[in-house]
Image (cartoon, grey):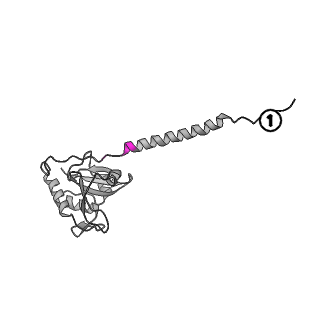
Amino acid sequence: MPTSSLPTPVTPRLFSLDAGRLLRRLALLLTLALLAGCASRDLTTHDARHGTDGLSIERALILATAKEALGTPYRFGGNSSKGLDCSGLVEMAYRSAGIPVPRTADEQFRHLPTVEAARPGDLLFFGDRRKATHVGIYRGNGQMIHAPGSGRRVVSVPLDVAYWQERFLGAAGPAP
């Protein structure tokens, strides 16, 4: 009797094992992506109805000092009108209102009381989820006053830019 030389059938089990592993990995990646999306914070603000009406005297002083600092050159570690870094601007503005704050952006982020919706005079923190690397003062009307970096000056910028939205960590409201 002649022997058959038919090819050995491929076992579907090997394929299903690889496909099952692939599906589990895809499901894990999808779950992680969804969790990361849930963990992101929205940059939410709450403005006073009529400019500075309804703001505390401390908030008005913080904003006035920050506005006076517009155009001041950036200086790493600076916290005076001669030169400012981002957390130095915050420290100077809050000092003018009699409110002590920690020195660095990350210390401010970790130690100051958080708020869900920033009001004018509150602090806005930006970074990489592990550390706050930048801070600005919410001016109102979707604007932030901040010291952007070396070679630049203190400016007011819109917050609806993707750059800020993607890096936003949270807000703090140490002023009454």
**Residue 12: which quarter of the image?**
top right
Q: Is residue 87 above or below residue 165?
A: below
Residue type pointed to by label 1: Ser
| Observer-nearest of 3 and 80 | 3
* Residue where numbered disc 1 is placed: 5
Q: Is residue 126 above or below residue 42?
A: below
Q: Name the spot of residue 51 as percent of width and height, x first.
A: 14, 51
Q: Residues within 10 Å of mark 1 (few under 14, many from 20)?
A: few
| Observer-nearest of 3 and 113 | 3
Classify residue 50 as left or right of residue 147. left
What stretch of residues is rendered in magenta?
A: 37-42
Dividing the image into 4 quarters, which one contains the N terminus?
A: top right
At horizontal 26% and vertical 66% (from top left) the residue drawn is 153
At horizontal 29% and vertical 57% (from top left) the residue drawn is 135
Q: Name the spot of residue 168 as percent of width and height, x first.
A: 33, 51
Does residue 110 belong to the magenta stretch?
Answer: no
At horizontal 56% and vertical 41% (from top left) the residue drawn is 22
| Observer-nearest of 153 and 136 | 153
Q: Label 1: state its secondary structure.
A: loop
